[in-house]
Image (spheres, rainbow, N blue to C red):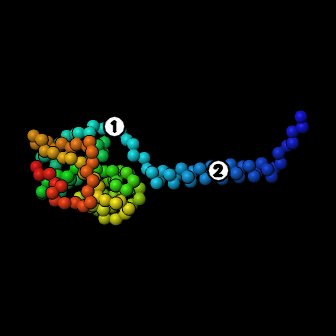
Amino acid sequence: MNKKPISRRKLIAYAWIGAAAIVIAELIGGTLAFLWPRRKGPKVETVFIAGKVTDFKVGEIIPFRKERTFILRTEEGFLAISSICTHLNCIVNWNEMLKKFECPCHGAKFNRNGEVLEGPPPRPLDLYKLQIVAGNVVVDRVSSIERSKFEPSQLVKS
Ligand code: FES
C-alpha cells in the first residue's frame, strides 16, 4: 500500500477546523446555558416551619436558601416570597444595602414585596402559601401563587 503523507498545509488546516469547532461548541453551550439556566437543586420538603412568629423582626427579610423562599415581615403581616425569578427561573438574592431582590442572570431587580423594578421578568416574584399555626410561621411550597402586583391583602397577619 502506498499511503500518501499528509501535507503540512492540510495538517494546519485540520488543526484550525478542529479549534474552530471547539470554539463554536463552547459558544453554543454558553448561549444555551444563558437562555435556559439550571433550576435543579436539592430536594426539599414542600411544607416547612420557618420559625416562631417572634423570631421575625418587622422590616426583616429572611432567606431560606434550601427552600428557595424569603420570609418578609411587615407591620401588617408576613409574605413567603419565592426566590425563583419569574423570567427564566434563576435564584434571586436579597441585597440588604439596596433593599432589593436581584437576579444574577439577566439583571432583574424586585422591590421588597417582590414587584419588578427593572429587567425582563413578566411578573412579580411568586408567593407561597403561608399560615400561622400555633405561633409558628408555616410555609407550603406545594404550588406557587402567581400575581400581577403586590396587594396588602397578600400579607398574612400574625
Ligand atoms: S432569570 Fe432572567 S432576569 Fe432572572
Residue 16 rendering spot, x and y as whole percentages: 71, 52
Amino acid identity at mark 2: Ala
Given residues 7 and 80, the one toward you in this image is 80
Callout 2: CB less than 8 Å from ligand 1: no
Classify residue 34 as left or right of residue 152.
Answer: right
Callout 1: CB less than 8 Å from ligand 1: no
Residue 118 rendering spot, x and y as whole percentages: 34, 65
| Neighbours of disc 1 within 10 Å: few (<14), some (14-19), many (20+) | few
| Neighbours of disc 2 within 10 Å: few (<14), some (14-19), many (20+) | few
Q: Ligand 1 shows up in which quadrant of the image?
A: bottom left
Tell how many labels: 2
Residue depicted at 43% across the width and 50% down the height? 37
Residue depicted at 38% across the width and 62% down the height? 120
Residue 83 rendering spot, x and y as whole percentages: 31, 50
Answer whether labels 1 and 2 touch (C-beta < 8 Å): no
Q: CA distance from mark 1 to mark 2?
A: 37 Å
Residue depicted at 77% across the width and 48% down the height? 11
Question: What element does badge 1 sit on?
Answer: loop
Decide which of tag 1 and tag 2 comes sooner along the chain. Answer: 2
State whether residue 57 appears in this view.
no
Which residue was labeled with disc 1?
A: 43
In terms of image quadrants, where is residue 125? bottom left
Classify residue 9 as left or right of residue 81.
Answer: right
Question: What element does badge 2 sit on?
Answer: helix
Amino acid identity at mark 1: Lys
Q: Which mark is residue 141?
A: none
Q: Which mark is residue 21?
A: 2
Classify residue 66 as left or right of residue 58.
Answer: right
Residue 141 rendering spot, x and y as whole percentages: 26, 43
State whether residue 33 appears in this view.
yes
In terms of image quadrants, where is residue 134? top left
Residue depicted at 50% across the width and 51% down the height? 32
